Image (cartoon, rainbow, N blue to C red):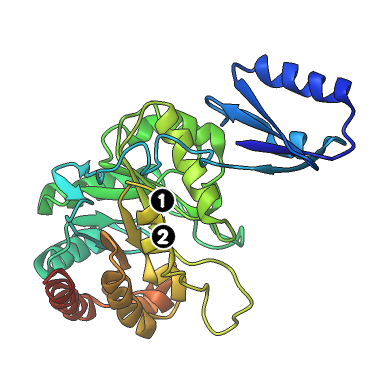
C-alpha cells in the first residue's frame, strides 16, 4: 500500500501518521519527491482502515498494491482449489451440476425430483428448507421438516444435498448437511460467515444483489480466515436498471473471479433471469465462460410450485439442458 501525502502536509502531522502506521506492525519507507511525498507500507496492510486514512487532511490518496483479501487470492494460492462436496469435486477442472427445487414442499416432491435430476446427470441436490422471501406472507419453507425430507432424498438417490442456512441459531440443524448455502441476502452477514468458517463444511457463497466482486471475495475471506478453505463462489445475477429479467447475470464475473481467486466459481442462471426459457441459454453461456458448475432450479410441476415456479425447469427440460452442457464442455475443453 502506498500513501500519497499532500504537498503542504506539516512535518509533525507526517510524523504522527508514520508512528500510527508503525504501531500497527508495518514498516515504513518514505519517498520524498520534489512536489510530493509518498509513504510505502511494508507488511500486512489488510487491517489498515483505508477510508479513515484517506480522510486525513494530509493525505491526498491511498493506493493499494495488493488486495485486502489474502486467503482467497490467487497471488497467495496459484493452484485452483478443488472443493470436496461429500465426494463430489468442484473446481480445478471438475464440473458440478446442482439441481432441485427452490423449496422443499413434501417428501414425495423432493424424492421424485432427486431421482429425475440424478438420472439426467446431476451431481448434487439443491432444495430450500429455510426460504428468505421478500414478502412476509409468502411461503418461507418447511424448515426442520424440509431438512428431514432432503435427507430422505439423499438416502434414496445418494446425491449430496445443498441447502441454505439463514440464521446462525439454526446451525446445529445442519450438522449432517453436505453443503451449506449462504444466500445473496446473507452474503455480508459477517457473524454467520465467521461461524461457518469453524464448521469445515463446504460453503456455497452467493454474490449479493448489489455487491461488487471485491465484496464477494472479502465475504469469502471471512469464512477462510476462520479456518474453512472449502468455499464455492456463486454468481447469481445482480440488481441493475433492467426491467425484463429478475436480475442481470454478470458472466464477466466468472473469468474475473478465476483471475483474482483460486476458489471454484459456479453460475445460477435461474435466480439471475427469473424466467425458465432463459435459464438454458444463460446456463450454456456460463459453461462456455468457464464456470466450475451450475445451479439449476427444477420442479416436477412448476405451475404449482410454492416458490419461484416461473424460473424452474421441468425434469425433462433439465435433462435436455444437461446434455447440452456436456457438449459445450467437450467443445470448450477440447
- Residue 188: percent from left, percent from top: 56, 44
Q: Residue at x 23, y 51 (%)?
A: 91
- Do labels 2 and 1 touch, CB within 8 Å? yes
* Picture layout, residue 297 above or below residue 205: below
On screen, 228 above or below 12? below
Q: Is residue 296 visible?
A: yes
Residue 307, above or below 244: above
Residue drawn at (67%, 14%) of the image = 23
Position of 112 with respect to 163 (left or right) is left
Label 2 sits on residue: 256
Which residue is at the front of the view, 78 or 18? Answer: 18
Image: 72 above or below 257 = above
Nearest the camera: 266 or 168?
A: 266
Q: Quadrant of the N terminus?
A: top right
Disc assigned to residue 166? none
> Where is residue 279 drawn, in percent x and y?
35, 78
| Residue 320 screen position, x and y as percent | 17, 81
| Residue carrying label 1 | 260
Provide the secondary structure element on which disc 2 rests.
Answer: helix
Which residue is depicted at the point 30% across and 80% down?
A: 280
SS state under label 1: helix
Tell me the crowding category of disc 2: few under 14, some 14 to 19, or many 20 or more residues within 10 angstroms, Cα based. Answer: few
Amino acid at each position: 500500500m502506498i500513501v500519497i501525502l499532500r504537498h503542504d502536509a506539516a512535518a509533525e502531522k507526517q510524523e504522527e501518521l508514520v508512528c500510527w502506521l508503525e504501531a500497527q506492525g508495518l514498516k515504513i519507507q518514505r519517498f520524498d519527491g520534489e512536489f510530493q511525498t509518498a509513504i510505502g507500507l511494508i507488511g500486512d496492510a489488510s487491517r489498515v482502515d483505508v477510508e479513515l486514512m484517506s480522510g486525513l487532511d494530509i493525505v491526498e490518496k491511498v493506493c493499494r498494491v495488493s488486495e485486502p483479501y489474502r486467503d482467497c487470492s490467487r497471488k497467495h494460492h496459484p493452484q485452483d482449489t478443488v472443493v470436496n462436496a461429500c465426494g463430489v469435486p468442484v473446481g480445478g477442472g471438475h464440473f458440478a451440476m446442482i439441481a432441485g427445487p427452490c423449496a422443499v414442499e413434501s417428501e414425495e416432491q423432493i424424492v421424485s425430483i432427486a431421482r429425475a435430476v440424478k438420472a439426467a446427470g446431476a451431481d448434487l441436490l439443491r432444495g430450500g428448507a429455510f426460504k428468505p422471501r421478500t414478502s412476509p406472507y409468502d411461503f418461507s419453507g418447511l424448515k426442520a421438516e424440509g431438512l428431514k425430507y432432503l435427507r430422505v432424498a439423499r438416502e434414496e438417490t445418494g446425491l449430496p444435498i445443498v441447502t441454505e442456512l439463514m440464521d446462525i441459531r439454526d446451525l446445529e440443524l445442519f450438522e449432517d448437511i453436505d453443503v451449506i448455502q449462504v444466500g445473496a441476502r446473507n452474503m455480508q452477514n459477517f457473524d454467520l460467515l465467521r461461524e461457518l468458517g469453524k464448521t469445515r463444511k463446504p460453503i456455497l457463497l452467493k454474490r449479493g444483489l448489489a455487491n461488487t466482486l471485491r465484496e464477494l471475495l472479502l465475504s469469502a475471506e471471512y469464512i477462510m480466515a476462520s479456518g474453512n478453505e472449502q468455499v464455492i463462489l456463486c454468481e447469481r445475477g445482480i440488481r441493475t436498471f433492467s426491467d425484463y429479467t429478475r436480475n442481470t447475470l454478470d458472466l464477466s464475473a466468472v473469468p474475473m473471479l478465476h483471475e483474482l481467486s483460486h476458489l471454484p466459481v459456479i453460475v445460477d442462471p435461474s435466480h439471475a433471469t427469473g424466467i425458465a426459457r432463459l435459464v438454458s441459454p444463460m446456463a450454456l453461456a456460463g459453461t462456455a465462460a468457464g464456470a466450475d458448475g451450475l445451479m439449476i432450479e427444477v420442479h416436477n410441476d412448476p405451475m404449482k410450485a410454492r416458490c419461484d415456479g416461473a424460473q424452474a425447469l421441468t425434469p425433462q427440460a433439465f435433462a435436455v439442458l444437461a446434455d447440452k452442457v456436456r457438449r459445450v464442455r467437450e467443445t470448450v475443453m477440447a
